[in-house]
Image (cartoon, rainbow, N blue to C red):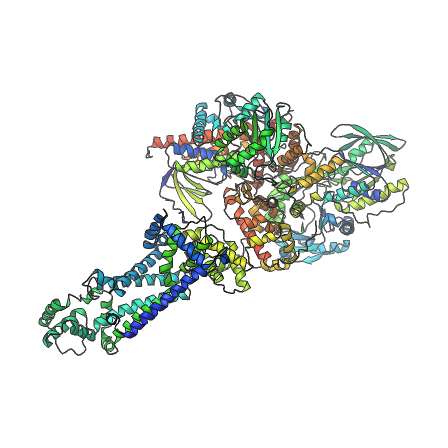
C-alpha cells in the first residue's frame, strides 16, 4: 500500500549526475547516464516529451536562408562543419552522433517503440498539413507511410469525425499534384459516434482494445478499393502500438501507418510512458512534477539543488549537473522586455543586442528568427562558458535546445541535437570523474 | 457600373456616409481597397470620447465629442459598452492642470464629477497606489467593426453596394467633372469603371493620394498610433491619464480585453506602418505608471493606425494639430463633383458623415434631411460574431451536437464560421482564413492562430472551399497577419506561445519551406 | 467459588446484572447490524436475507484461498496493529500498551480462577511473577492512558475531536487502573488483611512467632501494625524471616515486587491507620470491581466495543471482495463498520480535502465526521435542513482518493460508506450536487445564477473562503492552448453521451475564465464531473493549477447554486 507519506530523499547521498529537464535531451541524458551505471536523478515537469512528434530529425535543411533540403544528412552535416558555424553539432563527431542515435533507438526498440532508419538517408513523409517532411529516424508506426510516398502507390487516408486538427481531404487536396493516388475517407470513430469533439489521446487509448480495432477495420475495409496502404492520424495506441499496427494490417490486408499531427501528440505520450516507466527500473530516481527551485554548491564543488513540489521541498546533492531545460517552453530560458535569461544558474547567454533584433517581421521568413539562435554557449565538453569563453562551473553541462547557435525549427535538427549533445555531455562528465579518480565505479 | 454617389474608403466615415445618403434615398457604391476598417477606423482604441480628453487643448473638439457621444450612445447602443470613464493623475503630474480640469470641462459642457483617489481605486482596483486625483467622466467603449458593418448593412439594405478589395487607380475628368473612376481588383488585377454623379473621398490617411489622382494636392500629415491588447480584461471603466495628451495614457476595456495606447509618431507613408519594439516598451512603461499590473500582463497583440491630420503642424508629434475634421469641396480645385472628408476622430464619425452628405446633397439638389441624428441604427446579426464571448454562450445554449468549436481561445464555433463563409460567398468573395479572422474572433486569442489556424483550414478543406494546395499559402498569410500584431510583444508567456507556434508550423510541418522564394 | 471470588453476594449479583446488560447490548448491536439500512437497495433486502448472506459469505470466505488474507489480517493487523504502526508510532504505542496490558490483566488477573489457575495450578495472586506482572501490565495500561490523554490535549482539533464517549472510556479505564493499584497498596498496609491471612494459612502460631512474623512483615513487606507491642530486633526479624520462609513465601512473594503498589503504600503509610479504620481496602476493592462491571455492562454501548468490532471489521474487510458488492451482506458489514469506528481521526488527518475544511469550516468534509453523519442518517435521525446541507456539501467535496480507506486502522471500507451515504442523502432529497446539477445545462445554470446575483454577493463577501484562483488572471493567462489537459482527462475520455460531449473541456475552462464567462464555467458538467485526479495539472507544460481551478469553481458554483430553488422556472432569454 502506498502511504501518503512524504518521500525521504537523503540529502547526504551524493548522486553522480543530476539531469534537469524532461524533454528528449533530459530523457536521453538520463538514459545514457543510467546505461553507464551512474547514480542519476532527474527532475522536470511531467509534460516534457508530450510536444515531440515522435520523429527523430537529424539535419535536413542547411543553410536555412536558402531552404536547401538534403536527402543525405551527413552531407548536410559536412556542409555545416565546413561553414565555420558554431552549431553544437560541430562539437560532436559524426561517429558519436551516430552512436547516440544507435543507443537511444536500441533502447526504445527493446521497450516496444520501434524505429526505422537508414544510416545515410533522410526519409520523406507527409504531415497532417499536407506538407512533405524530411526526417532521419522514423517510428515503425509511420514507416509504411514513407514507403507509400516513395512509390506514390494508391493510398487511403482515414480521418475521424470530430478530430478537428486532422482532415484527410486537406492532405489529399494539398498533395494531389505529387501523389494523385491518395484518397480521403472520413469515418466515425467506433464508440464515439455522435461526439463532436474527440481527442487524439483518447482515441489512442480506445484503440488498445482489439474490439475497437475490429470495428474500425470493418468501417474501412469495404472502402479500401485499390489502396495498398492506409494512413491514419497518429493515434494508433500508446502502449501497444506494435500490436495495433499488426492487427490492423491483418484486418485490412494492407499495411497501415500514422501521419504526424499537431500536439498534444500521441507519439509524444508513447515516449513519455516508456521513459517514465522504464528509466526508474534501470536505477534512475525520477522526480516527476518537480522543478528545481534553486542551486548552491558545496565546498567540494558538488551541486546542492533544491527541488520544489506542491507541498514540500527536497535537497539533492550531485557531483555534476546536466542542464537540459529546453528553451522558452521548457522554461530553460525566460524572457522579458529587456532580454533573455537562464534562471537556474544565471548563465550569461549569447543573444541579440536588443528585442528589436529578436524576430523577423515575417513569421515564415526563411532565415529564421535571430532569437532562436540565442542560448547557452559551451566549450567542446558542453560546459557552459561565459562571454570570455571561460568555463562557469567545471561540473555543469548543458544539452539540447538551450544551446546557442542553432535553429532546430528551421534546420530540422531538434531530436538529433538533443540526443547527441546529451550523449556528449554525459560522456564528458564521465571522463572527468574517471580522470579525477573520485568516483567509486559500480 | 453606375451609381449616384461613389464613396471611396470603407472606414467609419465612409460607411456612415453610405448610410446617411441611403436614408436620404440616394444610392451609392462604396469601394474599399482592403477590407472595412482596415485603416484608422480599425486601428484605434475603440473609445467613444466624452470630450474630457480635449477640454484643455481643443475645446471645439471637446464640445463635438460630448454632443456626438450622446447621440451615438442613444441611437447605436448595440455598438457601445457604456463603461464610464475616469481621469486619474499620479504623483508628479502637473498639479495646476489637475486643479484646473473641472473648469476646463465646465467651459466645454463636458460633465465631470470630482472623485477621490480612494474611490477611484475602489472602482478600479488595478489603479496605482500613487493616484493623487481622479474625476469621473462619461467615456464609453465602442466596437468600430460592428459600427461600420452595421452602417454598411443598412445602406446595402436600401440598395447601395459595397465593393471590397477594389482600389481606385484613376479618374477620368473632363469638363470640371469626374466622369468615370477607374478601379482595380487587388486580387485579380481586373480593372473596371464606375460612373457616378458625385465622388466622395473618405479615405482618411489616404485622402491626399486619392486627391492626387484627380490632380489635386492637399496638405496632410500622418501620425502613427500604436496600441497593445491584453490577454484579459483588467479594467471596468476607461482610464485616462489626467494630463495633457501624451503617450500611453488611455486604457480602454472592450469585451474581454483591455487596450492600452497610444503613441504618436510622425510617419511618411500610411501604407508601411507596424508597431515597433520601442513603441511597445514605451507603452508598457508609461501605462504601468497608471496601472502597474500592465508591467507583468500578458499582451496578445499590438496594432497601430495612422491618424490623418489635415493641414500643416508647427512640428512636434502631431498632437498639436487639430483633431477636428476637414470637409473639402473640390469645386474650388476645378473638380465640381468631388468632395474630400478627412481628419476627425472616431467619436465624430457620424457628424462628419452628416456634413459630407449635406454638401453632396446640396450639389445634387437633394433636399432630404439627415436622419442619422434621430434614427436608431438597426440591429442585425451580420457581424455578431465579432462580439467577444457571444460564440461560447450561443454554443452552450443551443447545445447543438453538430456544432464544434474551431477556435478554442475565443471559442469560435463552426456555426459562426459557416455564417461568415455564406456571407462572403454571397458577395462573391472567396473565404480565406484572414477574412474569417476579421469577421469572427478566430485567431484573436492567446494562441494567435497556431492551433485554430490549422483547425479552420482543415474545416475549409472539408467544406470544399479549398481544393488544391492553396491552403498552405492561405494559412501563411493568416499567420503573417497575426504575426504583424505580435512580433513586437514577444516576451514572457507570449514568447512561449510564439515558440510553440513556430515549433509546430516550422519545426514539424516545415511550412516555411513552402513560402514563395524571392 | 463465587463467594470467594467476589466476597459478597452483592457483587455476585452485580456481575450477573452487568453480564446480562452486556449480552442484551450485544444482541441489540447485532440486531442493528442486520436491520440498519445503509447503502443502495436498502429497503429491498429483509433482515433474514441479510443474515443468510452473511453466513453464506463467511462460510465461502472461510473455505476460499482468501482465508490466507484472513490469517494475515489476524496476525499483522489485529495482533501487531500493523495498520496503526504505519501511520503513527505514538498512537501505536498507546494502543499497544493499553491493548496488551488490559488483555493480560483481564486474562491473568480478572479471570484468574478461569484462566491462570488452570494453566498454573499453584497460582496465587500474591505470588511472583503474577504480582510483579500485574504491576507491569497495570503500568502499561496507565502509560497508554496517559499517552491517550496527552494526545487528545496536544492534537486537539478536527481530526482528534474528544467527545463524550472518549472521555467516559478514558475515565473508566483510569478509574479501574488506579483503584486496582490502590487496592493492592491498601492491602499491603492493612493489618486486618495480614490477620486474615494468618488465620487462613498459619493459624497455629504462638504469639511470639506471630510477633516475629509481624515484625518481619512490617519491616520488609510494609504492613502497618498500629498497636505493635514488640520491638523490632535483628533476632526477631531473623525469626520472622525464617517463619516467613516456612509458611508464607509459597503463596505470598515479597510485596516489593509490586513495584508500583509498594512504593505507593510506603508513601501513604502515615495514613495507614485511617485506611485501616475506614476499611479502605474493601472500599477500593468494591469500587475497582464495580467499575469493571460497569465497563462490562457498558461495553456494547461504548467505545470499548471496538475490542470486538475492530478485529471483526479487519477480518471481514480482509476477506471480502471489494469489487463485487452484494447488498445483502454489505449492509450488515456497513452497519458493523459504523460501530467499529473509534473516532481515532487517522482518516481525517490523511484526507486529501482536509485543506478545504480549513477554509470552509464544514466539519462534514472530514471523513471521521462524515462517518458519524452516515450513522445518524442510517439511524433514521431527523436532521435539520442546515445539517443536511452541510452533510451533502461534505459528501460531494470528497475526491474519492481512497486514502481514508487505506489508512483506517479498523480496516473500514470508508469508500464504500461514502457510496452508501450518497444514497441516504438522495433518499432524503439531498442528492449529490453533481447529480442534481444535471437538472439543467450550463447555460440554464448561468441564467439561474444571474437571476440570483444578489445572493452571490453575500457568498462572495465571505472573506478568505477561496484562494481566488479563478479571479486572478496570472493563474490561467499562461495557457498556451496545447490541449494536453484535455487529452489526459479521464472525464472527457469517458464521455459517452453526445449531449455531454458538447461540453466544456479543462482547457476550455481556462478560456472561459479569460473571457470572463465564469458563470458558464461554473455551470458546466466538466466542473462537476471532475474527479480531481490531477492529471491535467501534473501534465500542464505551463504549470497552471488546472485541477485546483476546477476545484475552486466547483466550490464556488456550489455556493451559488445551493441558494437557488431548483424547482423554479428559468427565466433566461430564449435563444
Q: Position of residue C206 (x, y in %)?
A: 10, 76
Residue B334 placement, left or right of C182: right
Residue B50 placement, left or right of C335: right
* C410 or B209, nearer to the observer: C410
Q: State whether residue B265 appears in this view.
A: no
Q: Is residue A402 above or below residue C293?
A: above
* C11 or A175, nearer to the observer: C11
Q: Position of residue B333 (x, y in %)?
A: 86, 35
* C32 or A290, nearer to the observer: C32
Q: Position of residue A187 (x, y in %)?
A: 60, 34
Find residue C119 and report its image quarter. Answer: bottom left
Q: Position of residue A112 (x, y in %)?
A: 45, 31
Q: Is residue A29 above or below residue A67?
A: below
At a point 73% along the width and 51% down the height, the residue shown is: B50
Quadrant of the rendering where the N terminus of chain C is positioned? bottom left
Residue C126 placement, left or right of A208: left
Amino acid at each position: 500500500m502506498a502511504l501518503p507519506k512524504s518521500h525521504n530523499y537523503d540529502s547526504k547521498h551524493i548522486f553522480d549526475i543530476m539531469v534537469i529537464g524532461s524533454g528528449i535531451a533530459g530523457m536521453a541524458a538520463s538514459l545514457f547516464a543510467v546505461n553507464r551505471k551512474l547514480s542519476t536523478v532527474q527532475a522536470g515537469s511531467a509534460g516534457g516529451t508530450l510536444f515531440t512528434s515522435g520523429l527523430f530529425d537529424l539535419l535536413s535543411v542547411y543553410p536555412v536562408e536558402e531552404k536547401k533540403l538534403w536527402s543525405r544528412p551527413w552531407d548536410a552535416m559536412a556542409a555545416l562543419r565546413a561553414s565555420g558555424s558554431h552549431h553544437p553539432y560541430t562539437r560532436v563527431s559524426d561517429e558519436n552522433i551516430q552512436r547516440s542515435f544507435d543507443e537511444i533507438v536500441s533502447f526504445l526498440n527493446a521497450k516496444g517503440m520501434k524505429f526505422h532508419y537508414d544510416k545515410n538517408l533522410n526519409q520523406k513523409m507527409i504531415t497532417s498539413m499536407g506538407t512533405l517532411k524530411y526526417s532521419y529516424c522514423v517510428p515503425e508506426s509511420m514507416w509504411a507511410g514513407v514507403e507509400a510516398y516513395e512509390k506514390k502507390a494508391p493510398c487511403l487516408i482515414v480521418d475521424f469525425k470530430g478530430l478537428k486538427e486532422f482532415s484527410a481531404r486537406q492532405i489529399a487536396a494539398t498533395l494531389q499534384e505529387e501523389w494523385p493516388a491518395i484518397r480521403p475517407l472520413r469515418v466515425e470513430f467506433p464508440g464515439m459516434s455522435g461526439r463532436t469533439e474527440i481527442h487524439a489521446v483518447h482515441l489512442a487509448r480506445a484503440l488498445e482494445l482489439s474490439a475497437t480495432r475490429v470495428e474500425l477495420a470493418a468501417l474501412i475495409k469495404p472502402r479500401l478499393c485499390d489502396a495498398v496502404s492506409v494512413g491514419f492520424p497518429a493515434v494508433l495506441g500508446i502502449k501497444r502500438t506494435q500490436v495495433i499496427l499488426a492487427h490492423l494490417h491483418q484486418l485490412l490486408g494492407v499495411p497501415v501507418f500514422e501521419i504526424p499531427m499537431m500536439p498534444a501528440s500521441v507519439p509524444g505520450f508513447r515516449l513519455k510512458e516508456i521513459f517514465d516507466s522504464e528509466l526508474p527500473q534501470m536505477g534512475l530516481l525520477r522526480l516527476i512534477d518537480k522543478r528545481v527551485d534553486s542551486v548552491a554548491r558545496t565546498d567540494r564543488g558538488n551541486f546542492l539543488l533544491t527541488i520544489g513540489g506542491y507541498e514540500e521541498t527536497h535537497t539533492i546533492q550531485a557531483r555534476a549537473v546536466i542542464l537540459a531545460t529546453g528553451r522558452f517552453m521548457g522554461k530553460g530560458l525566460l524572457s522579458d522586455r529587456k532580454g533573455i535569461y537562464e534562471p537556474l544558474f544565471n548563465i550569461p547567454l549569447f543573444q541579440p543586442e536588443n528585442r528589436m533584433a529578436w524576430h523577423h517581421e515575417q513569421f515564415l521568413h526563411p532565415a529564421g528568427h535571430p532569437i532562436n539562435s540565442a542560448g547557452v554557449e559551451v566549450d567542446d565538453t558542453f560546459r557552459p562558458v561565459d562571454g570570455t569563453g571561460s568555463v562557469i562551473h567545471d561540473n555543469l553541462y548543458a544539452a539540447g535546445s538551450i544551446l546557442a547557435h542553432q535553429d532546430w525549427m528551421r534546420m530540422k535538427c531538434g531530436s538529433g541535437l538533443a540526443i547527441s549533445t546529451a550523449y556528449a555531455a554525459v560522456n564528458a562528465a564521465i571522463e572527468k570523474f574517471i580522470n579525477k579518480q573520485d568516483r567509486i565505479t559500480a | 457600373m453606375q451609381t449616384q454617389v461613389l464613396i471611396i474608403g470603407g472606414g467609419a466615415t465612409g460607411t456612415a456616409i453610405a448610410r446617411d445618403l441611403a436614408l436620404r434615398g440616394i444610392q451609392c457604391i462604396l469601394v474599399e481597397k482592403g477590407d472595412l476598417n482596415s485603416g484608422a477606423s480599425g486601428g484605434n482604441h475603440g473609445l467613444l470620447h466624452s470630450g474630457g480628453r480635449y477640454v484643455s487643448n481643443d475645446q471645439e473638439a471637446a464640445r463635438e465629442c460630448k454632443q456626438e457621444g450622446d447621440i451615438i450612445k442613444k441611437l447605436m447602443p448595440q455598438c457601445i459598452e457604456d463603461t464610464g470613464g475616469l481621469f486619474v493623475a499620479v504623483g508628479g503630474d502637473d498639479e495646476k492642470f489637475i486643479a484646473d480640469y473641472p473648469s476646463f470641462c465646465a467651459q466645454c459642457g463636458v460633465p465631470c464629477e470630482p472623485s477621490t483617489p480612494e474611490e477611484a481605486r475602489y472602482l478600479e482596483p488595478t489603479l496605482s497606489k500613487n493616484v493623487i486625483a481622479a474625476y469621473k467622466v462619461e467615456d464609453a467603449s465602442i466596437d468600430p467593426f460592428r459600427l461600420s458593418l452595421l452602417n454598411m448593412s443598412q445602406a446595402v439594405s436600401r440598395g447601395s453596394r459595397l465593393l471590397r478589395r477594389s482600389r481606385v487607380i484613376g479618374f477620368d475628368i473632363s469638363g470640371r467633372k469626374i466622369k468615370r473612376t477607374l478601379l482595380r481588383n487587388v486580387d485579380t488585377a481586373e480593372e473596371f469603371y464606375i460612373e457616378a454623379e458625385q465622388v466622395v473621398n473618405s479615405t482618411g490617411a489616404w485622402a491626399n493620394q486619392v486627391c492626387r489622382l484627380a490632380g489635386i494636392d492637399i496638405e496632410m500629415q500622418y501620425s502613427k498610433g500604436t496600441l497593445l491588447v491584453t490577454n484579459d480584461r483588467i479594467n471596468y471603466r476607461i482610464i485616462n491619464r489626467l494630463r495633457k495628451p501624451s503617450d500611453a495614457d488611455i486604457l480602454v476595456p472592450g469585451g474581454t480585453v483591455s487596450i492600452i495606447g497610444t503613441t504618436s509618431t510622425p510617419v511618411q507613408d500610411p501604407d508601411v506602418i507596424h508597431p515597433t519594439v520601442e513603441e511597445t516598451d514605451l507603452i508598457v512603461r508609461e501605462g504601468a505608471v497608471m496601472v502597474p499590473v500592465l508591467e507583468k500582463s500578458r499582451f496578445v497583440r499590438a496594432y497601430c493606425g495612422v491618424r490623418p491630420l489635415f493641414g500643416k503642424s508647427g512640428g512636434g508629434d502631431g498632437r498639436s494639430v487639430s483633431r477636428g475634421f476637414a470637409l473639402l469641396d473640390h469645386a474650388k480645385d476645378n473638380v465640381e463633383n468631388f468632395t474630400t472628408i478627412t481628419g476627425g476622430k472616431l467619436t465624430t464619425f457620424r457628424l462628419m458623415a452628416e456634413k459630407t452628405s449635406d454638401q453632396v446633397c446640396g450639389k445634387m439638389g437633394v433636399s432630404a434631411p439627415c436622419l442619422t441624428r434621430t434614427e436608431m441604427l438597426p440591429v442585425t446579426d451580420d457581424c455578431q460574431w465579432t462580439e467577444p464571448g457571444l460564440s461560447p454562450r450561443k454554443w452552450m445554449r443551443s447545445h447543438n451536437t453538430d456544432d464544434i468549436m474551431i477556435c478554442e481561445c475565443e471559442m469560435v464555433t463552426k456555426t459562426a464560421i459557416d455564417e461568415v463563409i455564406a456571407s462572403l460567398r454571397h458577395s462573391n468573395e472567396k473565404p480565406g482564413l484572414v477574412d474569417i479572422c476579421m469577421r469572427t474572433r478566430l485567431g484573436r486569442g492567446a494562441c494567435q492562430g497556431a492551433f485554430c489556424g490549422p483547425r479552420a483550414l482543415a474545416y475549409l478543406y472539408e467544406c470544399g472551399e479549398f481544393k488544391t494546395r492553396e491552403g498552405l499559402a492561405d494559412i501563411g498569410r493568416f499567420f503573417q497577419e497575426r504575426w504583424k500584431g505580435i512580433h513586437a510583444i514577444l516576451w514572457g508567456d507570449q514568447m512561449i506561445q510564439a515558440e510553440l507556434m513556430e515549433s509546430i508550423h516550422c519545426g514539424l510541418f516545415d511550412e516555411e519551406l513552402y513560402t514563395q522564394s524571392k | 467459588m463465587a463467594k470467594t471470588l467476589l466476597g459478597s453476594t452483592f457483587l455476585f449479583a452485580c456481575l450477573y446484572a452487568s453480564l446480562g446488560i452486556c449480552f442484551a447490548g450485544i444482541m441489540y448491536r447485532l440486531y442493528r447490524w442486520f436491520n440498519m439500512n445503509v447503502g443502495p437497495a436498502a429497503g429491498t433486502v429483509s433482515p433474514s436475507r441479510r443474515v443468510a448472506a452473511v453466513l453464506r459469505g463467511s462460510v465461502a470466505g472461510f473455505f476460499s484461498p482468501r482465508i490466507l488474507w484472513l490469517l494475515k489480517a489476524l496476525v499483522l493487523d489485529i495482533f501487531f496493529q500493523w495498520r496503526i504502526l504505519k501511520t503513527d508510532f505514538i498512537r501505536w504505542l498507546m494502543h499497544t500498551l493499553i491493548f496488551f496490558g488490559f488483555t493480560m490483566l483481564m486474562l491473568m488477573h480478572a479471570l484468574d480462577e478461569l484462566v491462570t489457575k488452570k494453566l498454573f495450578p499453584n497460582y496465587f495472586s500474591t505470588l511472583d511473577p503474577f504480582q510483579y506482572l500485574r504491576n507491569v501490565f497495570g503500568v502499561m495500561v496507565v502509560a497508554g492512558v496517559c499517552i491517550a490523554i496527552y494526545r487528545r490535549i496536544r492534537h486537539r482539533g478536527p481530526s482528534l475531536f474528544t467527545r463524550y464517549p472518549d472521555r467516559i472510556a478514558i475515565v473508566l479505564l483510569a478509574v479501574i487502573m488506579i483503584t486496582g493499584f490502590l487496592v493492592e497498596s491498601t492491602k499491603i498496609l492493612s493489618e486486618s488483611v495480614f490477620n486474615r491471612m494468618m488465620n487462613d494459612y498459619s493459624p497455629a502460631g504462638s504469639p511470639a512467632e506471630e510477633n516475629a512474623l509481624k515484625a518481619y512483615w512490617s519491616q520488609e513487606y510494609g504492613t502497618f501494625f498500629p498497636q505493635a507491642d514488640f520491638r523490632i530486633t535483628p533476632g526477631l526479624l531473623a525469626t520472622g524471616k525464617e517463619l516467613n520462609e516456612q509458611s508464607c513465601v509459597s503463596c505470598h512473594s515479597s510485596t516489593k515486587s509490586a513495584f508500583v503498589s509498594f512504593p505507593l503504600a510506603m508513601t501513604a503509610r502515615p495514613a495507614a491507620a485511617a485506611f485501616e479504620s475506614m476499611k479502605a481496602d474493601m472500599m477500593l476493592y468494591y469500587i475497582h470491581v464495580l467499575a469493571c462491571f460497569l465497563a462490562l455492562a457498558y461495553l456494547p454501548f461504548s467505545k470499548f466495543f471496538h475490542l470486538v468490532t475492530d478485529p471483526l471489521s479487519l477480518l471481514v474487510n480482509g476477506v471480502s471482495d471489494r469489487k463485487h458488492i452484494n447488498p445483502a451482506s454489505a449492509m450488515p458489514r456497513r452497519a458493523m463498520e459504523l460501530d467499529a469506528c473509534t473516532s481515532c481521526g487517522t482518516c481525517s488527518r490523511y484526507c486529501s480535502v482536509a485543506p478545504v475544511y480549513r477554509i470552509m469550516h464544514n466539519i462534514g468534509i472530514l471523513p471521521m465526521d462524515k462517518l458519524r453523519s452516515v450513522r445518524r442518517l442510517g439511524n433514521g435521525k431527523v436532521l435539520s435542513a442546515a445539517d443536511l446541507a452541510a452533510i451533502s456539501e461534505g459528501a460531494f467535496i470528497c475526491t474519492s482518493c481512497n486514502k481514508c480507506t487505506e489508512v483506517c486502522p479498523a480496516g473500514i471500507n470508508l469508500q464504500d460508506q461514502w457510496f452508501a451515504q450518497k444514497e441516504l442523502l438522495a433518499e432524503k432529497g439531498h442528492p449529490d450536487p453533481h447529480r442534481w446539477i444535471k437538472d439543467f445545462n450550463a447555460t440554464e445554470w448561468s441564467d439561474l445564477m444571474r437571476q440570483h446575483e444578489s445572493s452571490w454577493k453575500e457568498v462572495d463577501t465571505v472573506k478568505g473562503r477561496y484562494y481566488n484562483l479563478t479571479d486572478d488572471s496570472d493563474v490561467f493567462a499562461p495557457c498556451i492552448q496545447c490541449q494536453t489537459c484535455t487529452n489526459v482527462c479521464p472525464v472527457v475520455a469517458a464521455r459517452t453521451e453526445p449531449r455531454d460531449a458538447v461540453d466544456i473541456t479543462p482547457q476550455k475552462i481556462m478560456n472561459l475564465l479569460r473571457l470572463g464567462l465564469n458563470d458558464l464555467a461554473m455551470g458546466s458538467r466538466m466542473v462537476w464531473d471532475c474527479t480531481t485526479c490531477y492529471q491535467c495539472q501534473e501534465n500542464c507544460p505551463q504549470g497552471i493549477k488546472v485541477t485546483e481551478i476546477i476545484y475552486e469553481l466547483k466550490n464556488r458554483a456550489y455556493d451559488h447554486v445551493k441558494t437557488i430553488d431548483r424547482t423554479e422556472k428559468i427565466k433566461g432569454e430564449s435563444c
